[in-house]
Amino acid sequence: MIEDELRAAFARLEESTPPVGPVRAAVDRAVITRRRRRRRVRLAGTALAVAAVALVGFTAMAPRPPAPTAAPLLATPEPEPGGALNLLLLGVDQSAGSRRADSVLLVHVPADRSRLYLVSLPRDLLVPAPGGTEKLNATFSRATGSGTDLAAGYRATRQAVARLTGVRVDAGAVLTYPGARDLTDAVGGVPVCLPEPVRSVHTERRFPAGCQRLDGAAAVDLLRQRYGLRDGGLDRDRNAARYAAGLLRQMRERGTATDPAQLNRLLIRIGPAVTVDAGDLSLPALVGATARAGAAEPVAVAFPVLAEWNGRGYEADPELTPGFLDALRADRLGEWAAAHPARVTGLR
């Protein structure tokens, strides 16, 4: 009796069950959509990482406060964020188990997206710190602890730069030397124009004055040099800006930033060596903003410091720094650069 009632109940339920085909098709569509969405996120991350690396050279982003993540890949277009943007890009040396931010570049993207402004911040610039001042470079290394937490070093440096400049740092990236070497080789070398010859104290390699194309090993070698240069670390910062401009030019000419196949190859080669932080911005929107501004030749300027080494580091120039910071905060770096041509780094 009970068995007959159960059979009847199952029969009634079976009649009310929707056909399997449409349900399965809906599930398949959902899976495909989810996969496409994941792929768009990966593409977005990689494009941004590549763009960020292109902006900074050896030194292009998950919400705060979570730590930056390894760079994932170009996404479908999204509305760009309005107003000016500031990206902090760090190039990290690794030696004897420690990590140092040898290159600190603040990339200013103006609201009109007319071009990029590469602002070099000397690694030995003295910045406020607990108990007094410390080198900007020390801010990064102190925060990394054992030397493995690049995300912590980035966050500490971002805070220091924000306090120093008074501008919001919207996003940023960290690239290690191995990543810079692989990136340079992956794009077919980078053209760099030097105003004076440079001799490497590490390899005895000689870089002549004038324009030349550097492979990965040569690029990293050049970007490490400060001894023997007229202005030491300040000249190294200028060479980093020249490299960054050459890398941008190379990527534009090759169409790398818009070619998914090339981006995939770059992801394989440099992905693990890049740490990115998008702040509160979406990755695709940030890529769009930087890509549009990056279509023009960038302008490289150095944070105004007193050229004399005071025994502990470089001090901000008391005459030029206030006006420079006002221009940065008001999105008028173009006007400031035009009024102070001696502070603009020649890129060609």
Image (cartoon, helix red, strand yellow):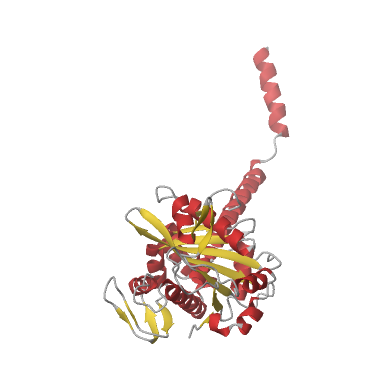
248, above or below 40, in the image = below
User: Residue 290 location in percent, x, y?
Assistant: 60, 70
- Total number of numbered discs in the rendering: 0
Q: Residue furthest left?
A: 204
- Residue at 60% x, 71% y: name it: 321
Picture quadrant of residue 37 = bottom right
In this orientation, which residue lies closer to the viewer: 125 or 98? 125
Splitting the image into 4 quarters, where does residue 313 fall? Answer: bottom left
Whether residue 73 is situated above or below residue 226 in the rendered picture: above
Lateral position of residue 261 relative to residue 166, left or right: left
Q: Nearer the viewer, residue 198 or 322?
A: 322
Taking the view exactly as shown, the residue that stands out farthest to the top is 1
Which residue is rendered at x = 73% and y = 33% of the image? 16
**Where is 245 relative to 25, above or below?**
below
Question: Which part of the image, by quadrant, shows the N terminus?
Answer: top right
Q: Left of 213 or right of it: where is 88?
A: right
Q: Is residue 259 visible?
A: no
Q: Residue furthest front?
A: 310
Q: Residue 110: horizontal and vertical position, in percent?
A: 66, 73
Between residue 149 and residue 37, name the one nearer to us.
Answer: 149
Q: Report the side of 219 relative to 34 (left or right).
A: left
Quadrant of res 195? bottom left
Of 42 and 270, nearer the camera is: 270
Query: Where residue 154 sits: x, y (%)?
Result: 51, 56
Q: Position of residue 26 (x, y in %)?
A: 65, 47
**Residue drawn 50% across and 71% down?**
54
| Residue 316 appears anywhere in the view | yes
